[in-house]
Amino acid sequence: MRRWTAVAWGAAGILAVAVAWELYKFLGPADGFVVGAIAGETGSGVMLLPRAHDRAMPHLWDMVARLFESTSGGDTPPLIVSVASAALLTLGIAAVGWAIGVAVGMLLGLAMQRWRLVEWGLLPWIVVSQTVPLIAFAPVVNVIGNQIDRGGFPWPQWVSVAVIASYLAFFPVAIGALKGLGSPDRIHLDLMRSYAAGYRSTLLRLRLPAAVPYLLPALRLAAANAVVGAVVAEVSIGMRGGIGRMLIQLAGQGSSDPAAPWGPTFGSIALGLVAAGSVALVGLALRNYRRGEATA
Amino acid sequence: MTTVTTTSIPAVKAEGVGKTFPTKGGDVVALTGVELEVAAGEFVSLIGPSGCGKSTLLRLIADLDEASTGTLEIFGKPARAARVDQDYGIAFQQSGLLPWRTVAGNMALPLELHGVGAADRVTRVAELAELVGLSDFVDRYPDQLSGGMQQRVAIARALAEHPRLLLMDEPFGALDEMTREYLQSELARIAAETAAAVVFVTHSIPEAVFLSDRVVVMSPRPGRITDVIETGLGANRAEALRESPEYFAKVTEVREALHGAPVERANER
């Protein structure tokens, strides 16, 4: 019963966005509302209300219909097929990035939890690392990758994308692992000490299980980050075939085919949902480690 | 449960034991000059107001903290060696069960850690569940149990490896009065059955008298032993004991010993 209520609320949320979109499109000024525009100078003034004409805001049904028309005319496959295959490629790369990020994040978390000195030395750098803009960082990874590739060790472009995705993914895992591994109560640590349990057994039987409620949200964040990272990285290093590249390409043709860029947009939303949903499945498998937590 | 007066090695032997905690405002003496011997199989309670060092003394015996002065021997060994050899089982005020493990899983934890085989673990867990009356609940998780049941699991876990010494830090402190009295009787029975020595920290005078062969009265600032009272109530710890004149006499004696010491409403540690 509660489950269905939740589903109904979710559907209502999506519907509300759709209704708001069409409502504004119906009521809003076609050319927007601009204050202080200088005549004859495009782009001048401040736009208070966005444009509502068909090129700026296509109808929802046009977006959906566009999904089933051919991608770029001729006998190219329907847009939805191209979007799906691009999304799958990106998903695969994001998954590799996620896996690398989770591994690195866990190792950092373990090291920081074990040695206070490592935490003091490393934690500020980990935080700073996330302030580096991805579009500045991505080309650097690409250049290094190309050099490795030229040096004889094969380094296809998608590996660079995965590495960039992992750069965003490792952060929540490192923080979550640090917090979770340090979460057992004094009483549990005393108990393990009374059993003369060493670091390894304490880690396996106490710290790791206790960290699960902290790690699950971290893994979910990491999944979302990996998808965003992969999409942005594809764009900024110019990798073909993925959903990021497709998004840019179709957005470029937006003025003549305004409904088209919404295809890959929906694709990347679906991608994020699939990624976060897969992690939710992991959470389901580990639900015994979340006892005492409110089930969400 | 009579006081054992054999020549066997005492379960606990403390000589001039003290503990000082360094703090920002200078050293705090938590415990000083503790002389105490607990015979094998003897039930000894430590009682006193907050800050008298009774929990600290228990933690020193358990080697969860290290004594600053004096010598502390558990079955003739240094406390650390006794901990490593698993000579004692311990239970705290909170049950400290692992929430992701079932009752059986929690009871089996020390066995697992010390490499007891799966088949032996199953047998032992069944025995323990029987001992604490939880045979029907072995597959439950701690959050599905009442506080009293959780505490019984914790006691079973402490007994898992047949320790000769049981250390208990206010194990019934967080329970309601009825559950508390019930578990006291259970503990008296279990202690008699297992013949383990028990060092039992408590706030409650009736609890200390009902359970113990000897009650050690402690006093704060600095934490020290001020009196030791033999209860002499013998092996029979049936419910009727709670109504008997000897019991009341001992309760009064312990109360006077406690209040004879300068009592202050000290804050919790």
Image (cartoon, rainbow, N blue to C red):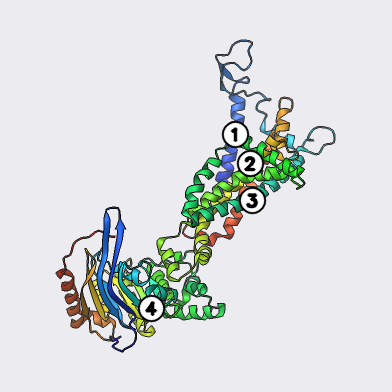
Q: Is residue A84 visible?
A: no
Q: Is residue B57 left or right of residue B246?
A: right
Look at the numbered discs 1 and 4 and tell me whether their residues touch, using CB distance below 8 Å: no
Mark sitting earlier along the chain (1/3): 1
Pointer 4 residue = B77
> In front: A176, or B24?
B24
Pointer 3 residue = A100
Q: CA gap, disc 2 to disc 4?
A: 59 Å
**Residue sitting at x 60%, y 51%:** A104
- Identity, as a three-letter code, of the amino acid under mark 2: Gly
Number of residues whose C-alpha sits closer than 10 Å to that of mark 3, classed few (under 14), some (14–19) or many (20 or more): many
Pointer 1 residue = A19
Q: Is residue B163 left or right of residue B200?
A: right
> In front: B176, or B168?
B168
Q: CA gap, disc 1 to disc 3?
A: 40 Å
Number of residues whose C-alpha sits closer than 10 Å to that of mark 4, classed few (under 14), some (14–19) or many (20 or more): some
Chain letter of disc 2 in the image: A
* Quadrant in the rendering for residue A151: top right
- Identity, as a three-letter code, of the amino acid under mark 3: Ile
Residue A197, compared with residue A94, is above or below; it is below
| Label 3: element kind | helix
**Which is closer to the viewer, label 4 or label 3?**
4
Q: Is residue A209 visible?
A: yes
Look at the numbered discs 4 and 3 and tell me whether their residues touch, using CB distance below 8 Å: no
Residue A5, compared with residue A46, is above or below; it is below
Q: CA gap, disc 3 to disc 2?
A: 13 Å
Q: Position of residue A127 (x, y in %)?
A: 52, 43
Q: Looking at the figure, which quarter contains the C terminus of chain B?
A: bottom left
Look at the numbered discs 1 and 3 and tell me whether their residues touch, using CB distance below 8 Å: no
Pointer 2 residue = A229
- Identity, as a three-letter code, of the amino acid under mark 4: Lys
Chain letter of disc 4 in the image: B
